[in-house]
Image: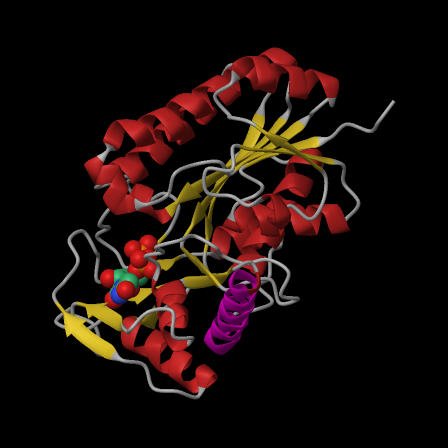
Amino acid sequence: MHEPAILVTGGAGYIGSHVVKQLGRSGRRLVVLDNLSTGFPDAVLHGELVVGDTGDMDLVRELLVRHRVRAVLHFAAHIVVPESVRDPLKYYRNNTCNTRNLLACCAAAGVEHFIFSSTAAVYGIPQETFIDEDAPTAPINPYGASKLMSEWMLRDLAAASQLRYVILRYFNVAGADPEGEIGQRTPEATHLIKVACEAAVGRRPGVEIFGTDYPTPDGTCIRDYIHVDDLAAAHLQALAHLEGGGASTILNCGYGHGYSVREVLAAVERVSGRPLNIRETGRRPGDPPALTADSRRIREVLGWRPRHDDLEFIVRTALDWERALARKQAAEG
Ligand code: UDP
């Protein structure tokens, strides 16, 4: 009989694939469930990949039982904010309804530990720029709302069952595997560091700054960028916390300080050694001026310590990945 496996939904995606790599390295048995709508099979470096939908209850039930799953890490989700505004029901189906179905299967199969990928978008436009986990949740778009509803389901199910959870609220995730094996592959990406690195390697003509009149030192928005490998490590520590009997909790994932858009672009120019073609445009609707995580709780509860709290390192790994991706795509024709 095999040791129980960990089920990782969305493990072929950007963050999920980095967590799969670290979990696989640590010797855990993994089953990855991904419908490959935005993921890539070759990003799954460990475990068994099952191509299917998180909302497919027959499939999920069968996987949980066959692999004697005790722990689930749930990454599978749509994540594009403007798309969620245009097509909200797509987000409520894939992010909320599918999480509900997954949780129902977990409850029936006696899954004990659940780690959920949530987002700082649940805070909406906060009053404070330094946000702790007790700040009011008030999402301003369907993406954030779809994730917050999943948080509520998880909280309520845990109160009514043996299930314990860690909800991780991600701030601005960026960078790539320092060993260069995996990274973010999203076509038509919208995230600043990815976009700027694409421009730096010539895959885009340039990059726009969305708003230069914010009440910040240089007029551009400030965000808390966290390296994807530090975020992945937080998942392994969250799992160890639950497996060691730790209580359910909600944890912000960020470094606790931020950089402005101009600072990020300057770092990309320094690391690439080339000036970017930068155009200043108007504000993007719904962008708060500054958003940084109060990350004291994750440090206290998990003992988490970032290893890559360094903007240039984040940018370097993102840029290396972008170059590797360009070569890979050129080779594939
Ligand atoms: N941003 C920008 N140009 C871009 C993409 C993003 O100026 O091409 C800004 C955006 O307005 C925000 C910050 O960079 O202030 C981070 O945006 P991103 O979309 O990366 O993450 P978000 O904070 O929206 O989750």
Residue situated in front as seen by the camera: 206 or 262: 206
Residue situated in front as seen by the camera: 230 or 81: 81
Q: Where 230 sits versus 249, above or below? A: below
Dominant secondary structure, magenta: helix
Q: Coloring scheme of the render?
A: secondary structure
Q: Where 201 sits versus 186, above or below? A: below
Residue 232 can be seen in this image: yes
Does the magenta portion include 137? no
Please state the extent of the stretch shown in magenta in the rendering.
310-330
Q: Position of residue 255 (x, y in %)?
A: 47, 63
Q: Position of residue 297 (x, y in %)?
A: 50, 51
Residue situated in front as seen by the camera: 19 or 11: 11
| Residue 69 sits in quarter | top right
In the rendered image, the quadrant that contains the N terminus is: top right
Q: Residue at x 39, y 83 (%)?
A: 269
User: Farthest right residue?
Assistant: 1
Q: Which residue is drawn at 47% across and 83% down?
A: 271
Residue situated in front as seen by the camera: 308 or 16: 16
How many marks can you see?
0
On the picture, is 241 further left or further right than 2? Answer: left
Q: Position of residue 70 (x, y in %)?
A: 69, 25
Does the magenta portion include 321? yes
Q: Position of residue 316 (x, y in %)?
A: 52, 75
Residue 138 can be seen in this image: no
On the picture, is 154 further left or further right than 83? Answer: right
Q: Which residue is drawn at 39% across and 30% down?
A: 95
- Quadrant in which ligand 1 is drawn: bottom left
